[in-house]
Image: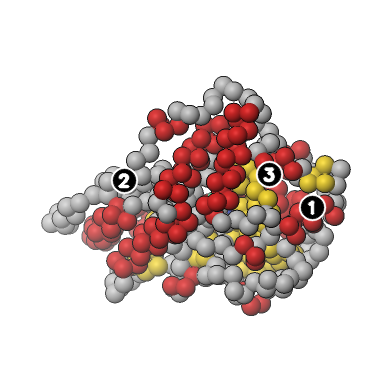
Amino acid sequence: MSDLQTPAARPANPRFSSGPCAKIPGFTLDMLADAPLGRSHRAAVGKNKLKEAIDLTREVLGVPADYRIGIVPGSDTGAVEMAMWSLLGARGVEMLAWESFGEGWVTDVVKQLKLDATVKKAPYGEIVDFATVDFNKDVVFTWNGTTSGARVPNGDLIPADRDGLTICDATSAAFAMDLPWDKLDVVTFSWQKVLGGEGAHGVLILSPRAVERLETYTPAWPLPKIFRLTAKGKLIEGIFVGETINTPSMLAVEDYLVALKWAKSIGGLKGLIARAEANSAAVNDFIKGKDWIANLAADPAIASTTSVCVKFTDPAIKDGAAFAKAVAKRLEKEGVALDAGAYRDAPPGLRIWCGSTVEAADVQALMPWIEWAYRAELAAQ
Ligand SMILES: Cc1ncc(COP(=O)(O)O)c(C=O)c1O
């Protein structure tokens, strides 16, 4: 279909990957010049940087003063697994999953820890009905399903007064969505998502009740040093003031600090949330009224504002998976959207990262390209 015109404008930044995500606007490597490279992270200069990262995390996210914030190894996966290995087994467990990462935590708990957990799953694009969840058990769930574009709308269905702990993987939600701290006992995320930071480190946030569990319960299984949060039955408080379990990357820490300071400069959490909402609205406004494309999350109340997943709904499409892949390839080849194909385990489609580091003008500029790629592929199939 040679008469198909390419759109006139291109996104200035075509990085729509869902992790690592786009760096902050205007990012250059020079911004990391203050990183204390070649110095010990246990020297004052290193410790101060780590402490500043913890303090700014608390300030920007609005984490309550009595919650601990630790920088831990292994990115978000490390933080989630450290929490599950350290806390679970004391009481019944419910595992909630609605996409690939949540399912990974189910595998951990059922197959590795071998706990007799109640597992509740919802299909891609939906979430588990929280009204059916027993919060007197420990409940593990992902706030925003990065690979399905479906998120928990709010914490209303989580009782403030509960016997179990809530363990929440919030990696693609933190900094872009409101998190109800009184409803969450463990929150984890990595720097490479909403703030466009680097991989490697995870953040583990613990409520006082989670700390109490750590100090009163010893799991039946061995814990490697990298997971150990207590010594002689007491919380290792140093972890929560920047004395990391093992050596962190001070370059990644500096990069996180730069991103946190940018976050403050645009209005903190409110500003960050507004940016993600404007970005996702740009996708949803484009989709509205079109019969060939739809949000994978049909219910707007649970549709993600960061990892927006769309599917192609035109019945003329012959092979859905091949079609979506070919569209993503066209977008990549044109240099208008990098890494925007759906996750390998997710239904075919596109996943457009709309987190806070992405510019709304870039999302808007991408939309006509999606239509162009869809029409070009339809003509070519
Ligand atoms: C919901 C969710 N959990 C966990 C992870 C794993 O994160 P990391 O690679 O930072 O450990 C991801 C990564 O995309 C994710 O989206």
Q: Above or below — where is 174 with respect to 248? A: below
Q: What residue type is labelled 1?
A: Leu
Quadrant where the N terminus sits is: bottom left
Residue assigned mark 3:
240
Marks 1 and 2, the one that precedes in the sequence: 2
Marks 2 and 3, the one that precedes in the sequence: 2
Taking the image as shown, residue 311 lies to the left or right of residue 88, namely: left
Quadrant where the C terminus sits is: bottom left
Taking the image as shown, residue 228 lies to the left or right of residue 33, namely: right
Q: Above or below — where is 314 with respect to 9? A: below
Q: Which amino acid does label 2 sit on?
A: Asn
Taking the image as shown, residue 327 lies to the left or right of residue 120, namely: left
Residue assigned mark 2:
13
Question: Callout 3: few (<14), some (14-19), or many (20+) C-alpha neighbours within 10 Å?
Answer: many
> Can you tell which quarter of the image residue 321 is in?
bottom left
Q: Which amino acid does label 3 sit on?
A: Phe
Q: Which of the two marks, 3 or 1, is nearer to us in this view? A: 3
Q: How far apart are marks 2 and 3 (CA)?
A: 36 Å
Question: Callout 2: few (<14), some (14-19), or many (20+) C-alpha neighbours within 10 Å?
Answer: some
Q: Is residue 57 visible?
A: yes
**Tag on residue 214?**
1
Mark 1 CB near ligand 1 (8 Å cut) = no
Residue 169 picture location, percent across and down = 60, 56
